Amino acid sequence: MSEKLTSRQEALALLKKHDCSTQIIKHCMAVAELALKTAIIIQGRGIPVDVHLVEISALLHDIGRSKTHTVDHAIIGAGIAKHSGLPESIISIIKRHVGAGITPDEAKKFGWKKDVYIPIALEEKIVAYADNLIEKSKLASIEITIEKLIKEKKIEAANRVRKLDDEINNLIGIKS
């Protein structure tokens, strides 16, 4: 498998090849735009970040939504990425982008194989952060995502989303 990252055009072509809807593609493009801006700001503050990896992974983060709109889209998307010969770095971001990650207990309840589904690398965190702030294809308050999780009685997940938001805001210079 090649560690060569795909181009923006190749990523968009891959979304289309896998029959992602126009809505999903617009969402992925909006997430990529925010993630890219975030990565550039963080990099500008002297923190190493692979800006190209962030952009391409953000474009591809919801490729699994071509098959399902459940939380399983992360696993399915990672499988599509792997089958497409994409590098492990992109596969990991797709697998770990949901909310602020999925804990081992949550993954077990979903019937997922034992693995790491929490974003660890900064690039993984940036894509998850940006995804949490894009509602359809528009920038939205983090409170919308947190309120949805609380309504669904997913308090631990809401707390993880808040913590991730605070962490990235701190890196870009926004104090919470």
Image (cartoon, rainbow, N blue to C red):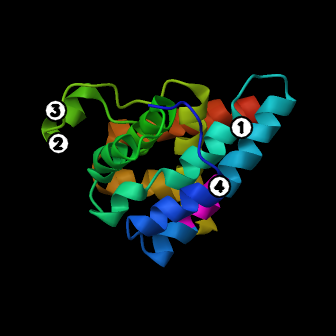
Kindly identify which residue carries mark 1.
Answer: 51
Which quadrant would residue 32 be assigned to in this image? bottom right
Of tags 3 and 1, which is closer to the observer?
A: 1
Asked if labels 1 and 4 touch by Cβ distance under 8 angstroms, the answer is no
Query: Residue flagged by tag 2: what amino acid is it?
Result: Phe
| Residue 30 coordinates in the image, percent (x, y) | 63, 62
> Closer to the camera, 99 or 4?
4
Q: CA distance from mark 3 to mark 1?
A: 32 Å
| Residue 26 coordinates in the image, percent (x, y) | 57, 70
Asked if labels 2 and 3 touch by Cβ distance under 8 angstroms, the answer is yes
The mark nearer the N terminus, 3 or 1, is 1
Q: CA distance from mark 1 to mark 2?
A: 32 Å
Kindly identify which residue carries mark 3.
Answer: 108
**Who's the residue at 47% across and 50% down the image?**
61
Judged from the image, the secondary structure of the residue bearing numbered disc 4 is helix
Of tags 4 and 2, which is closer to the observer?
A: 4
The crowd level at tag 1 (other Cα within 10 Å; few <14, some 14-19, many 20+) is some
Kindly identify which residue carries mark 2.
Answer: 110
